[in-house]
Image (tube, rainbow, N blue to C red):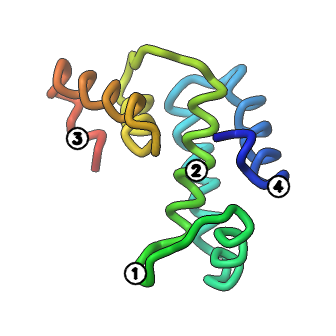
Amino acid sequence: MYDELEPVLRDYVDRLLAHAETALWPERREALASFWRGIAQCEADDHAALAAALGIELPEDADAAEIIFRLVLTAYIERLGASEVTNPDQAVLYGLSLEDAHAELAESWFAAHPEHLAALS
């Protein structure tokens, strides 16, 4: 996924990964939430242009900002290389990934730790 991103989005992933070197999962989740808030504030035309540059055909009712965020998130998780989910913040992020294997890890973790299902809210 990372190699398919536009250079600007790869730069965001790289910055998030640099932050991840010293951050725990709650801090990583907040950094990604901050990225989401920033993307969500951009104009719809900017989202559409970026989606087109990435070769993504968006259905009319699609939220381009969400799709771009999830692409960046998926690339971020891939680059981290963690193959095990160990806490609720990580599970929430993995559950948003476009990669089925990540989502399955999150699902399995929440199934084993139902007391943390509130983290999904």
Per the model, the C-alpha gap separating discs 3 and 2 is 25 Å
Q: Could you tell me the amino acid type at mark 3? A: Ala
Per the model, the C-alpha gap separating discs 3 and 1 is 28 Å
Q: In the image, is 83 to the left or to the right of 39?
A: left
Q: What secondary structure is marked by label 1?
A: loop
Answer with mark 4 or mark 1, whichever residue precedes in sequence: 4
Q: Quadrant of residue 113?
A: top left
Per the model, the C-alpha gap separating discs 4 and 2 is 13 Å
Q: In this figure, which residue is indicated by the disc labeled 1?
A: 61
Q: What secondary structure is marked by label 4?
A: helix
The answer to the question of whether label 3 and label 1 lie on touching residues, with beta carbons closer than 8 A, is: no
Closer to the camera: disc 3 or disc 1?
A: 1
Q: Image point 37% across, 39% down: which residue? A: 95
Q: What secondary structure is marked by label 3?
A: helix
Locate residue 6, reporting x and y percent. Answer: 78, 55
Q: Which mark is residue 71?
A: 2
Q: What secondary structure is marked by label 2?
A: helix
Closer to the camera: disc 3 or disc 2?
A: 2
Q: Is residue 99 above or below residue 48?
A: above
Per the model, the C-alpha gap separating discs 1 and 2 is 18 Å
